[in-house]
Amino acid sequence: MFSVMKLFTMILFIFSASSEISYVVNYTNGTTFQEGQVLTLSSSSDYYDVNITIPLSKPTYMNKEISSDFIFLATTMIIKVTLVDIDPELSFLIAQVHAKIDKVEIYKSFKKTRVIGQNVGLYFDAKNEKHVFYILNRNCEGGLFYVSVHGYGPKDPIPGGCNLESKIPIPPSTDIRLSNNYYNVEIAPPMAPYDPNCLENDVFITFYMLYQSELDYTTEVYFDGIRRMINYENITKNGIVVPFIFWNTRRMMSRYHGTNAVFAAVASTADGYSIYVPAQTYGCVNTSDQFCVYLGDIRTIIFVLFLMAISFLICFGGHRYVHIEMFSQGLMTSTFVCFVIMTATTSESYDIKLLISFIFGLVFASVWSMAWLVWRSPITIMLIPAFNCGFLVAGIMYYVVPSSMIYLGVDFNFWSLFFLVLLLVAMVILSTSKFGNILSCAFFGSYGFVVAGDMLLGSNFKYIVVNVLRRATVPNFNKAVLFPPFQTGEKVMIAVWVLIALAGMAVQYWFTRGQTSFPMCAPQLTMREAVNVAMYGTVERRIAPRKRKSKPNKGRTGVSSRA
């Protein structure tokens, strides 16, 4: 038998449950851990067996959570947990283990019950099986584990009782599957106690979610999210309901990179309820900083700097420097449209699509910048900024409209409404001449500038456009629930956006005061003079005809004829 090298206790979390686990650890020296302490276990060997007994003699409270506490495990340790003194009124138990580290394994005495993940759980019949399970830390480092046991009565539905897909006979856990643009939150169908054959579908399932602090990967915040979604009282107090759109046991969520989201599912009938094991995700594969930040490569850094520079010019000098306005907005718009079309129709790599789209944008922007020489109308200057402003307004509506509006899940309905809003906003801007052009430049340019800062700071303001891009290019994204987080980062970004937009409008009005609304595009304007126009208001001074001095009509005597 291996000896214990280190054994100590510490109090870490004030917010732990009011009904704590009283651990009785069976060592050769007979050490006993008291209630309300964090159990810390370590050994010098690769595997060290520890037996923990958790008494469940307390009655089941309204929130169903009868025991909970924290354990710190060293690397590659196995703990045997035995549940004793179970209330005879209980019908089944759900034992769950949560850890911030990835490879946590929980299992019974046979292989079919092995579950690996961060938020895992097991089902126990309260009367007809041994109440023993094992916890294995497979990671290369020690970590903190939160162990919780819930007890349910004979009228409560069994979470995962009608399972048809999972290898676990009754999986009570919530499964989160990540993809590039969304993630699926799935559970196995519950079973009503009066329907053991799962012939009826009258168990109501409600999904809840809670956003935690953005880009905060600390252990304290992680377990705080679990504790706030661990029982029914906390779930209804802290969580928001994720609406049903297409699937009863699944919710497809838009992925917000680096934002901590906690999900819990509640199965309820007229006589009782049960809670699935809550699950948590950061929207990224790994919670280390290099995986959960955007500025991870030189390509992204160059894009952010370019976007910040060009957006600054549009916001503060778009209407004054018309060539810059036409070229930059034409470049951004055509690159975006080309990228969307290529993503929807080709299978090229991301870099190839981005390169081709950028080259197309350069060509289109160059041609569009010279278009006003042919049409000689201010409409060529205002058209793209007006449509960009309309696109941004429509994107904001898609961003904030409640996801419970199921009719927007139909692509025809969504895109019809989207382009209707876009055209209405563009028509209003086109009808207001100088004011509309200044407004659209300041509005669109300030958003681009703020988005560049958003990518540096890590908030979710960028998803106003990203979600529209996903809707246009990602298959089945019409089934996704957006639910964008609105936290401190987003509030700061909105305030900065408004201030920069107002400053951009003021600067453009100041530098174009007392001048014509748009550069002169008269027929007598030569090509050389038009190309040299970099700032409107100077055209009239460059080509204004000189006043001819009238020559006196002298007679023979040298005196004017009037005289």
Image (spheres, rainbow, N blue to C red):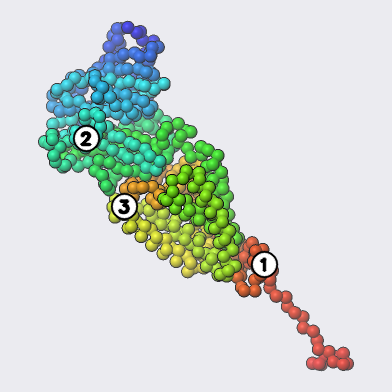
Mark 3, other Cα within 10 Å: few <14 / some 14–19 / many ≥20: some
Determine whether 265 is above or below 52 in the image: below
Amino acid marked by disc 3: Gly
Asked if labels 2 and 1 touch by Cβ distance under 8 angstroms, the answer is no
Amino acid marked by disc 2: Leu
- Residue 22 seen anywhere in this rendered image of the structure: no
> Tag 1, which secondary structure?
helix
The mark that comes first in sequence, 1 or 2, is 2
Which residue matches tag 1? 529
Which residue matches tag 2? 164
Instruction: Looking at the picture, tell me which residue is in the foreground, 2 or 56.
Output: 2
**Residue 447 location, x and y as percent?**
49, 52
**Residue 243 location, x and y as percent?**
28, 46
Give the residue displayed 47% in from the left and 61% down from the top. Answer: 387
Quadrant in the picture for residue 40: top left
Give the residue displayed 35% in from the left and 40% down from the top. Answer: 183
Which residue matches tag 3? 409
Q: CA distance from mark 1 to mark 2?
A: 75 Å
The mark that comes first in sequence, 2 or 3, is 2
> Tag 2, which secondary structure?
loop
Q: CA distance from mark 3 to mark 1?
A: 52 Å
Give the residue displayed 54% in from the left and 49% down from the top. Answer: 307
